[in-house]
Amino acid sequence: MVATATNDNAKKTAKSAKRAATGAKTAPAEVRKVLIRRGGSYDKLEQVSEPPKAPAAGQVAIDVRAIGVNYADVMVRMGLYSSAKEFIGWPITPGFEVSGVVSAIGDGVDDLAVGDEVIAVTLFGGYTSHLVVDAQYVFPKPKGVSFEAAAGVPAVMLTAWYAVHELAHPRPGAAVLVHSAAGGVGGSLVQILKRAGCKVVGVVGGSHKVETARALGADVVIDKSKVGKGLWREAERHAPDGYDVIFDANGVATLKDSYAHVRKAGKLVVYGFHTMIPKEGGRPNWVKLAADFLRTPRFSPLEMTQSSKSVLAFNLSYLFDRTELFRPAVAELTGWLEDGTLQAPPTTVYPLADVARAHRDIESGKTVGKLILVP
């Protein structure tokens, strides 16, 4: 017992010494970030500078090395993302995930030190060169993963993990269809589902995405650009009795058919509505948006009871305070990334100054994997 106590005290002393030795790191003279003062097109992505903020008690300051771009950021820019309006309003800095190096720590933070390489999730505010965030949302960067790749991990892999392990719970051997299987979330779903022993059919929107989905583990890849309106005939060929789970972030374009192809006791998991947004132009088409809203299926509890099928839906930005769910998930995902069970999504990197180009590209639907901004 004495030896154990002595060792524990030595570890605490060493950690305190590390914090004291590194705690004097100079803050940046200014912070560069993207600010949106009002919803609209790419011209609303304003580059601004401001003085750095010091972390308060329980917070960590991070010198940001890379920033993940998500489709939700586009919705924020257009003024269509409900949680952004509810929690922040205007002006707003978009961005949910970063990687970087801890530059300062507030009182009461004992498990992080200045100089630590980390990833972090944030409820908006991520498009910045210097981020101050609550320590509970900061995690060690997976070993062997670059800053750019690591920045593309938290949002998409947590989304996929939650969809699979908290909602769908597929059994080994389950037939599962994943829309957008070469994207950030879709590719993460493919990998996590394969790890769970599922048979995965991935759907992609172009021939240049087929090999990516296959490399991530999809057993079958359906290229919509080749099969056109025959998508569901092709899907039926690979699961004649229907699918145990279908993951759909497309919205009105596929929701009705996705539900129709879920078998009894199966589940449709919904986590986005991408097809309601134009692929070019940078602005909502309000007429189309209204029409798509009216065409969006309204699932009847009575019908679902009779058919014994479920519809499950979520938006992680509304679950941000559920850290008891996500801290263990990040630890598990980090372990899988470090042992090679999972691959970080492939990345395309842009300077922060080219944020408008990154938004154009992700809106186009032609990208593969994750888009990353570097301050």
Image (cartoon, rainbow, N blue to C red):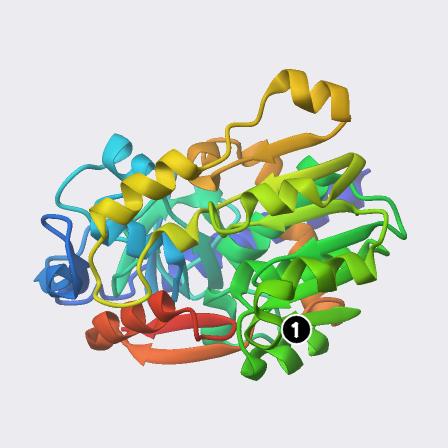
Residue 207 drawn above or below residue 14: below
> Which residue is rendered at x = 23% and y = 52% of the image?
285
Residue 335 on image: x %, y %: 71, 60
Residue carrying label 1? 213
The image quadrant of residue 2 is top right
Residue 327 can be seen, yes or no: no
Q: Amino acid at mark 1?
A: Ala
Residue 259 drawn above or below residue 97: above
Would you say 304 lies left or right of 23 here?
right
Residue 98 can be seen, yes or no: yes
Using a 10 Å C-alpha cutoff, classify the residue at mark 1 as few (fewer than 14 neighbours), some (14 to 19) or many (20 or more).
many
> Which residue is rendered at x = 70% and y = 67% of the image?
342
Residue 30 on image: x %, y %: 13, 65
Q: Nearer the viewer, residue 182 or 195?
A: 182
Would you say 27 lies left or right of 22 here?
left
Task: Name the quadrant of the N terminus.
Answer: top right
Q: Secondary structure at mark 1?
A: helix
